Image (cartoon, helix red, strand yellow):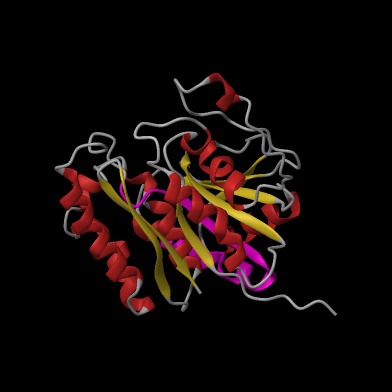
Amino acid sequence: MSITVRMPTWFIPHGAGPCFFMEWSPTHAWDRTADFLKGLAKTLPAAPKAIVMVSAHWLESNVSVTGSPNPELIYDYYGFPEHTYALQYPAKGEPLLAKAIVQRLNDAGVPASIHPSRGFDHGMFIPMLLMFPNADIPVVQLSLNSNLDAQTHLEIGQALASLRDEGILIIGSGMSFHNMRGYGKPQFGPISDAFDDWLTQTVESDPIIRNERLANWASAPSARPSHPLGEEEHLLPLMVVAGAASNGMGKQVFTDRVLETTISAFAFN
């Protein structure tokens, strides 16, 4: 008899475009992040039956879910070396899981629907090439809501929390610091540090306090310089996985200084 174990939820940094698969300047900027992502699967209690991926690079007015059994890749990055547009990640979709996700969201009062042809964007396949390189686990990708509201995304995660007890891993793919005008500038180091300290303390708090603080993240120290108004989509996958964690505790599992700014990853049990 097979036993299904509860999966954690993860919030991971997906890097900059296809950064892990090309030369970068400075050369080793993304090495520690790549090593972290490569080792994540070993921390799981069992192999996931499927993965639900929430990427910062897909926003819809209502939540949308990939329904194709064989999603194509969307190379939604620009100006990178030619070989990065030949990267492949042939993971299967899971239409039945997609339908179940939509049903659970709708039952929770979250409008959602299946997108029958949408593929996997780079917020999904770039980190997945490192985390699960064999592409042998089916993946369903979930969009963000373009309202960019933190509470909405906590509720999206809460509606999907029970998937964890079915052996399904929920991953939020974004960046804990994401200000395109701040990368590479030393003056943004202290700014990113202040927000990262607050974010880590928040994630590691009691779940009720955690969710209250995350819902009001914009009032945190250095919040807006770290995620400018209208550009906070890279933080919102964290809200989904925190919501899906339910009463599970959160922990910072990785942090690094990249392009003069601090980035972190979080896991919830």
Q: Position of residue 186 (x, y in %)?
A: 17, 41
Residue appearing at x 67%, y 76% in the figure:
5
Q: Residue furthest front?
A: 27
Residue 23: say if magenta: no
Residue appearing at x 39%, y 35% in the figure:
27
Up-down: is 135 above or below 269? above
Q: Position of residue 30 (x, y in %)?
A: 42, 43
Q: Residue furthest right?
A: 1
Q: Position of residue 148 (x, y in %)?
A: 36, 47
Up-down: is 64 above or below 78? below
Residue range corresponding to the magenta coloring: 153-177
- Asked whether residue 211 is in view, the answer is no
Res 72 quadrant in image: top right
77 sits to left or right of 65? left
148 sits to left or right of 133? left
Quarter of the picture containing the N terminus is bottom right
Residue appearing at x 35%, y 80% in the figure:
206
Which residue is more in the foreground, 234 or 259? 259
Which residue is more in the foreground, 83 or 223? 83
Residue appearing at x 33%, y 72% in the figure:
210
Residue 154: say if magenta: yes
